[in-house]
Image (cartoon, helix red, strand yellow):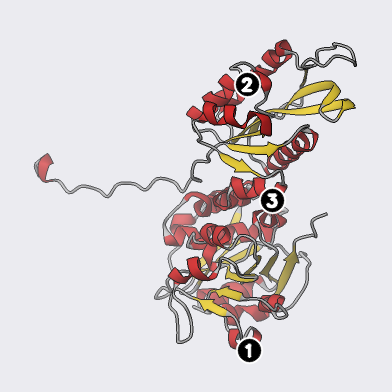
Amino acid sequence: MPPSLSPSLPPALSPALPPPLRPGAVIHGPGSVGVDRLLDDFAAELIRRGFRVGGLVQRNHGAIDDACAEVMELVDVATGHAFDITQRLGRESQSCRVDPTGVADASQAVRRALAERVDLLVINKFAGLEATGDGLIDEMLAGIADGIPLLTSVGSRYLNEWQAATGGFSDWLAPTMEALWRWWGPQRLYEDLLLGVADVPVRRVVVGAQWALVETDEGSGRSGLGVAARQTPGNGQEPTERWAGRSLRDLAALAARGWDPLDLVVGMAAINAHYNRPGLTGAAGNGLDLFAGVEGRVVVVGGFPQIASRLPRAQVIDMAPRDGEYPEAACDWLLPGAEAVAITASTFANRTLPRLLRVAAGARIALIGPGTPLTPRLFAYGIESLAGFVAEDRDAVARTIAAGGGSRDFHPHGRMVTLHRPPIS
């Protein structure tokens, strides 16, 4: 066949990478000790979860007054190395105590982070030096130009200079941990979950007509079984050769970065095989009962059984709405301003969960269903409660799913567990 007549292959889909972030600027008044600590804590938490974070945070020692410290350091968040940036001018001096030479020395940590293309670049602040074109402004603008997420802080006196330096391309952030996580964005929760998954052997993968499961090898030391619902029911058990021989983390990456519907379901089951392990404890009961006593408006996303009896006043949204239920498009109308929102775990696999979390921001949110990952990692993304499934008789669960059974059929072979976000102190 002549080349001009040869059939063309469909273009390969790009991985499901999180969308770019506009630079985040935490706004503060005189003094920045609390903001310095906030950026430090946020960077440390992301590093603990496995994200690659680079840059500098400021730590002060020995306060002279509300706006100044006796000793100021810039700390490399990746290595912990501290750079002294204090000019020792005497306690009575009113001049700026920041040593430009120390800041220049510390900039090497930022340049290394830029070269490594970290997941997040933290630069303690945009202040007097940066406002006049010195300090770390070149590194900040280089990170923005390269598309690397940048998090910094800006004192109120320098807002105009920051706007001029960035051309207004930034997001203003309140000085709270919740605001930083909202800026970080729920699209990153998939990668967050993946970073916690152990790289252990997989014993079996089963994909039935309604559900899929992934089970880890009991000899791996990380024994577990996870399930996830198929978005479109199949006609029977699917062959599993395409997933054979892959580790748990490899399969979990399908949920974090893939688009194929079956790969996504297997990937979510793999994630749940890590987090929903035997021995996990929590509250029992039906997840829909979490909002039974809520007086305000309750919205339920997903066609749960027994909604009418458990939450008779709830507004229900479903992809295939029945009489009295709303279509999927109603999310943008009903979720804003709701007091409580219950979301089916199936939204993980169809990738609608990040949008729902953004639209429902400010509500009490629960993720409900056997496919819910039971991990505190999800609480940072605005979720209050997680109600998921822990298998006890694994062989029975596998047989049920292989035979085309649904959640009601395999529920007797495990238990539902509910985790709650600890109160914010």
Which of pointers 3 and 2 lies earlier in the amino acid sequence? Answer: 2
Instruction: Pick out the residue farthest to the bottom.
Output: 309
The residue labelled by disc 1 is: 309
Q: Quadrant of the C terminus?
A: bottom right
Determine whether 299 is above or below 81 in the image. below
**At label 1, which amino acid type do we have?**
Ser
- Spatial separation of the CA atoms under disc 3 and disc 1: 34 Å
Q: Quadrant of residue 125?
A: top right
SS of the residue at dot 1?
helix
Residue 366, can we see it? yes
- Image depth: mark 2 or mark 1 in front: 2
**At label 3, which amino acid type do we have?**
Glu
The dot on residue 130 is 2
The residue labelled by disc 3 is: 178
Q: Position of residue 360 (x, y in %)?
A: 58, 63
**At label 2, which amino acid type do we have?**
Glu
Q: Position of residue 341 (x, y in %)?
A: 61, 70
